[in-house]
Image (cartoon, grey):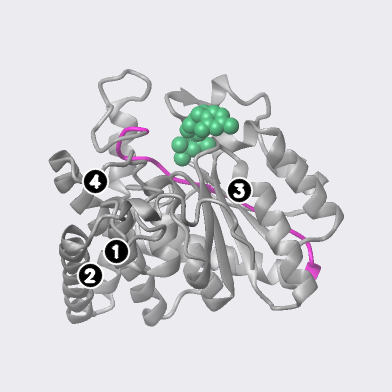
Amino acid sequence: MNKSSTSSIQARGLQNPTPEETAALYRRMLLIRRSEEAIVRLYPENDMKTPMHMSMGQEAIPSAVCEALGNRGEVIASYRSHATYLAQTLDVNRFFGELYGRVTGTADGKSGSMHLADIERGHLVSSGVVGAGISVAVGAAFANGVLKNNKIVAVFFGDGALEEGVFWESLNVASLKRVRVLFVCEDNGYAVHSGKPVRHAFQSLDSIVKGFASGYFSDTSNDVESIYATTKEAIKHLDSEHRPAFLHYRCYRYLEHVGIGSDLDYGYRSREEWEGWMQRDSLRIQRERLIDLGLEKLVGSIESDVDSAVASAIDAAQRAELPAPDRLFRGVFHEGA
Ligand SMILES: Cc1ncc(C[n+]2csc(CCOP(=O)(O)OP(=O)(O)O)c2C)c(N)n1
Ligand SMILES: [Mg+2]
């Protein structure tokens, strides 16, 4: 797996990541995985009073995109935003503060897991409305062009958002006005319990998106290094062509649509399909890659850093205060300058 994905990067003329990049990609993915493993363990205590749209299995895409964008990145996400939030901000403290509904959270503990945002760290907004962030991203990217601040907005959405008019309107206007924005489709094959064949009349997006004069980049591997290399190519395209780019990345959701359980007995997807994706788990592959590079010690220190960051964030969140009643309406509406 390791060798074949390396050679697929080479076959596409893309550069292999350095060992430092390999480790940084693993660190981002591990922070997401360990945080969600903790959610699976602790959610049944009923102290995190928010719905959970879990990202397990989908860590590679936001980790690769945020690493590739570095400090140029600004992210907009859907309700499935644990992974994008942690990949972009690396801030597990405010993350757990919000899930526990505490004042230390991203929104004073008032928004829950579907509206994670931290503008200062470049996670602009998340929304529970499918596709809602896409047009906002085009506006934010347009503003960056006017301000000439060199920032790049990446908007993450699922394959279900391709059925929303707002996606096509946003692609149209971004292509027409040559807005530098990355449309990142996290294609996990399902919208709730419906597969793509019963939802999409089109077979392939490639020619449709290219028809808009937008860049089109696709990666079906769910391999973080491959996605990282592809995203860097897309960023080059954005910078040289001054056009949007559509990144079509395949992934797989390990858990149920909403909640922390398995849904393999619901009958809409097969255990064989699920096992096939589990066998090429992006975290395991990345860990093996670091071991192959002789970096066992580094793996150990990344793992103990991440474990203690997650444990101390949970401990702090559990001990933090709930928002006082007089904060209820603060920050809900724009309060002027
Ligand atoms: C505009 C709108 N329509 C319907 C819904 C209900 N809904 C919530 S999640 C979802 C499926 C979205 O699937 P996808 O975009 O593929 O994202 P995934 O959950 O797979 O990450 C739907 C239809 C919604 N939240 N917003
Ligand atoms: Mg989906």
| Disc with the residue nearer the chain's start (2 vs 4) | 4
Q: Secondary structure at mark 1?
A: helix
Q: Earlier in the sequence, mark 4 or mark 1?
A: 1
Mark in the foreground, 3 or 2:
3
Residues at badges 2 and 4 in contact (C-beta under 8 Å)?
no
**Residue that badge 3 annotates:** 133
Q: Across the whole image, how many numbered discs are drawn on residues?
A: 4
- Residue position marked by numbered label 4 in the rendering: 48
Q: Is residue 145 above or below residue 213?
A: below
Instruction: Determine which residue is flagged by label 2.
Output: 306
Residue 174 point in image, percent of width and height: 78, 54
Split into 4 quadrants, where in the image is the C terminus?
bottom right
In the rendered image, the vertical position of residue 226 relative to residue 211, given as above or below = below
**Camera-nearest residue between 323 and 1:** 323
Disc 4 and disc 1: Cα gap in Å?
A: 19 Å
Labels 3 and 2: the sequence-earlier one = 3
In the picture, measured across the screen, residue 288 lies left or right of residue 78, that is left
Q: Please name which of the two marks, 3 or 1, marks the residue nearer to the observer.
A: 3
Position of residue 84 in the picture relative to residue 101 (left or right): right
Q: Which residues are magenta?
A: 241-257
Q: Which mark is residue 31?
A: 1
